[in-house]
């Protein structure tokens, strides 16, 4: 079993925000696996302080997890799912935003620091390791003079939308490759 945790904030006020691209990647995967329709749809359940969907991606079992704990407390949800299913840390992929990457870049990594992403930082602290694969989706850079918190909680401009839709599809492709082929092959294909 693989676990893909997409990070974001719950509620309609945050839908479509830069900070919720982790949720957006999961929605694409859910649609591809036949459990589309948003929160409460058939095939989705409330568990682990979040919403889950058990899916098959290219013949492999995977669990999609939307933590509903608020971004900065995502680790508790990921930890509960990991422990219940007895998933190795290397079989967890965290999808999240990164304002240090340009808006047309995704980056897969096997491990490392949180790089200033507070939701990812909470996951790493709760799991007790930095050896957790992550899929960073570029939403930046933060414009000069803008507050980073306001920037990540804001929505993409009409000029950015043509970049974001294909970027999210590429991120979902990278997550599928991670499930089916492993982190090294996925990194070679997508970084």
Image (cartoon, grey):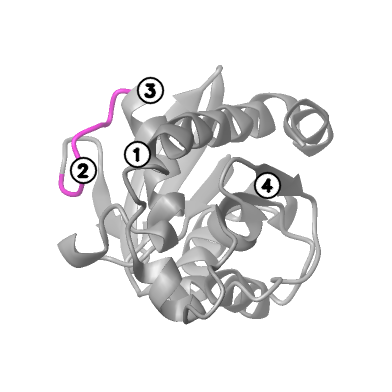
Q: Are marks 3 and 1 in contact (CB under 8 Å)?
A: no
Residue at 25% of width from left, 43% of height from top?
A: 44
- Image quarter in which the C terminus is found: top right
Mark 4, residue position: 91
Within the image, what quadrant is residue 188 found in?
top right
Determine the CA span between mark 3 and mark 4.
20 Å
In the rendered view, does 123 fall on the left or right side of 158?
A: right
Mark 2, residue position: 38
Q: Nearer the viewer, mark 2 or mark 4?
A: 2
Q: Secondary structure at mark 3?
A: helix
- Image quarter in which the N terminus is found: top right
Mark 3, residue position: 32
Q: Are marks 2 and 1 in contact (CB under 8 Å)?
A: yes
Q: Secondary structure at mark 4?
A: helix
- Give the extent of the magenta segment: 34-40
Q: Nearer the viewer, mark 3 or mark 4?
A: 3
**Main secondary structure found in the magenta portion:** loop
Going from N to C along the chain, the mark reached first, 3 or 1, is 1
Binning the other alpha carbons within 10 Å of mark 2 as few (below 14), some (14 to 19) or many (20 upward) gives few
Find residue 123 and report its horizontal and vertical position in percent.
59, 71
User: Eyeballing the image, is 8 above or below 65?
Assistant: below
In the rendered view, does 157 fall on the left or right side of 75?
A: left
Q: Can see residue 97?
A: yes
Viewer-proximal residue, 161 or 181? 161
Going from N to C along the chain, the mark reached first, 3 or 2, is 3
């Amino acid at each position: 079993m693989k676990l893909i945790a997409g990070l974001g904030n719950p509620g309609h006020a945050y839908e479509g925000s830069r900070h919720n691209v982790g949720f957006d990647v999961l929605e694409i995967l859910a649609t591809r696996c036949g459990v589309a329709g948003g929160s409460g749809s058939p095939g989705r359940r409330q568990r682990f302080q979040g919403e889950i969907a058990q899916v098959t991606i290219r013949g492999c079992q995977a669990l999609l997890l939307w933590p509903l704990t608020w971004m900065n407390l995502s680790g508790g949800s990921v930890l509960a799912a990991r422990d219940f299913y007895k998933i190795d840390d290397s079989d967890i992929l965290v999808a999240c935003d990164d304002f240090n990457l340009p808006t047309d870049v995704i980056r897969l990594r096997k491990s490392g620091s949180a790089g200033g992403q507070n939701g990812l930082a909470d996951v790493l602290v709760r799991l007790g390791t930095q050896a957790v694969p992550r899929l960073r989706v570029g939403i930046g850079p933060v414009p000069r003079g803008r507050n980073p918190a306001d920037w990540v909680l804001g929505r993409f401009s009409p000029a950015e939308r043509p970049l974001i839709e294909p970027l999210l599809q590429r991120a979902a492709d990278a997550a599928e490759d991670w499930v089916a082929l492993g982190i090294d092959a996925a990194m070679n294909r997508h970084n």
